[in-house]
Amino acid sequence: MLTEDYVRATFAILEDVYGNSPWNLEQIGRDFEQDNTDYFFVSDRDEIVGFLAIQNLVGELEITNIAVLRAYQGQGYADKLMQHLAERNETIFLEVRASNKAAQALYQKHGFEVIGQRKDYYHEPKEDALLMQRKGNK
């Protein structure tokens, strides 16, 4: 599959999940080209149904996005994506909507803990973010 196909699949997943993708095709394409960014995908048959994007920030990682098509949510695909981080030794950070209890439970299952809150971090709708961290093994 070509990079352009992955960019389009990522955009389609974001459109499905958010109703209006927070990133456009050009922004996603630029993100794919970054040396410090990695994308992981999960498929059902031949269809890409979810992705995980991480950014390496000088010895630490940040999950910049994880999303699964609505029709495939609750079937373990996000858990499969998170398993890509199981062997990583770096400390990993992420932000999650305060109301997104399902995502918080997933992250806690994978060793993340709430370490702070960012007021009004999200827009449409406006909402606080919880800052979560999984400590590295270094």
Image: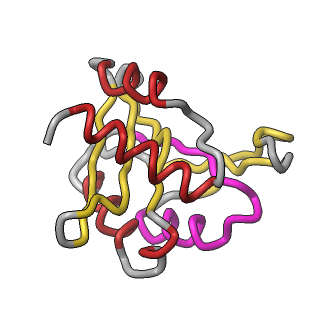
In this view, the residue in front, 48 or 98, is: 48
In this view, the residue in front, 14 or 109, is: 14
- Residue 17 as seen in the image, left or right of residue 92: right
Q: Residue at x 45, y 22 (%)?
A: 26
Q: Quadrant of the C terminus?
A: top left
Q: Residue at x 76, y 64 (%)?
A: 99
Is residue 98 on the magenta stretch?
yes
Q: Quadrant of the N terminus?
A: top left
Q: Residue at x 37, y 58 (%)?
A: 50
How many marks on residues? Answer: 0
Residue 71 seen anywhere in this rendered image of the structure: yes
- Residue 32 as seen in the image, left or right of residue 103: left
Q: Image height check: is 103 above or below 135?
A: below
The residue positioned farthest toward the bottom in the image shown: 75
Q: Image height check: is 36 above or below 3?
A: above
Residue 138 seen anywhere in this rendered image of the structure: no
Q: Image height check: is 37 above or below 124?
A: above
Quadrant of res 11: top left
Q: Residue at x 59, y 50 (%)?
A: 132
Is residue 48 on the magenta stretch?
no
Instruction: Please give the range of residues in magenta.
Output: 91-110
Q: Image height check: is 127 above or below 77?
A: above
Residue 51 in the image: x percent, y percent?
36, 52
Residue 24 in the image: x percent, y percent?
53, 30
Quadrant of res 84: bottom left
Residue 87 in the image: x percent, y percent?
21, 52
In this view, the residue in front, 105 or 127, is: 127
